[in-house]
Image (cartoon, helix red, strand yellow):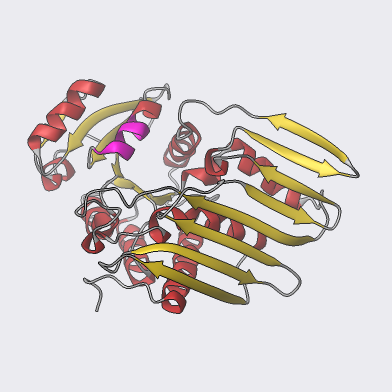
Amino acid sequence: MNSKIKWGIIGPGNIARKFASDLLLVEDAEICAVASRSHEKAEKFANEFNTEHVFGSYEALFSSKTVDIVYIATPHNFHKDLSIQAMRHDLAVLCEKPAGINQGEVQEMIEVAQENRVFFMEGLWSRFNPSIQKVKQLVDEGRIGELGYLHADFAFYGLDRDADSRVLNPNLASGSLLDIGIYPIFLAYLLMGKPDEILATSNFHQNGTEVQTSMIFQYPQSQAVLYSGISSNSKMEAEISGSNGTLFLQPRWHKASTYIIEKNGAQETVDLPIKGIGFVYEIEHVHDCLRKQLSESPLWSHQHSLDLVELMDTIRQKAGIKFPFEA
């Protein structure tokens, strides 16, 4: 795969447009196709990004042999089925987070990837953010000593959205946890591993949508305090504190362009400006995996995705978060 890597976009909504704008910044990437259940929406996206192939159904793109990899950017509850369809057409898949609604879905996706020997990765773009990568390196090296406390939050006001939107429609796996709560959960998992115990509580919209969730991850000698919500804004910063110092990721920490380290009364700010919106690093990593003919990412593996969704399943069980389409 020495020529440009050809991408297909599945679901040309807002997140797909952000992703595509960063694809244009990657020299060996080409946006070759777009598919939507609305041909009009697909045409609009194609005109915006100069995309050659336009399809009014997902199946048509999957069987077209026009792309090497697809980016799944539909609402959460369509991720599993569309990823599986794509992989059964021998296409590599980058599926926007969360990969699936629950652990069973993610397990099924991984099994299909392995059966068809195709690359599959959950699109958790923050894993590839330069500041987050550097913070992980500093933590792993013991630069702030033994971790004792982590705090991360992510919230925005979404109660003014349409009742049929992905934010508020329970049939689209609505709520804060899967959409944005995944980020604080990911950071705690990345830096501290799986907790021994999870405490979680949620508040709900009148239609059953979870609108805010507070979580505590209990470790033998440390805790992570996490929050997500769509009923108000929050500061959206991350603090990682150890026995010898503290690291801060500034708002919005999930796409940070700086980090701060405090030690011995001194503070140092390190700027690591991001390219584009921040998807570039994820895209470049996926390209490296494809060129090396890897079936999964060494930085965000299938097991990492399984661990993450297991944590979210536990939180949902503790807090009583359910969707109408689940048994």
Q: Main secondary structure of the magenta part?
A: helix
Residue 160 shows in this picture: yes
What is the tally of numbered marks visible in this picture?
Answer: 0
The extreme right residue here reads 264
Q: Is residue 205 rendered to the left or right of residue 271?
A: left
Residue at x 41% of width, y 68% of height? 203
Q: Nearer the viewer, residue 155 or 286?
A: 155
Q: Quadrant of the C terminus?
A: bottom left
Inspect the magenta stretch and tell me whether residue 17 lies in it.
Answer: yes
Residue 116, compared with residue 71, is above or below; it is below
Relative image position of residue 20 (x, y in whole percent): 33, 30
Relative image position of residue 157 (x, y in whole percent): 40, 48
Residue 101, compared with residue 13, is above or below; it is below
Residue at x 16% of width, y 27% of height? 44
Inspect the magenta stretch and tell me whether residue 211 lies in it.
Answer: no
In magenta, the rendered stretch is 13-20
Q: Nearer the viewer, residue 296 or 37?
A: 37
Relative image position of residue 71 (x, y in whole percent): 31, 42
Q: Nearer the viewer, residue 201 or 49?
A: 201
Residue 2 shows in this picture: no
Q: Nearer the viewer, residue 310 or 1?
A: 310
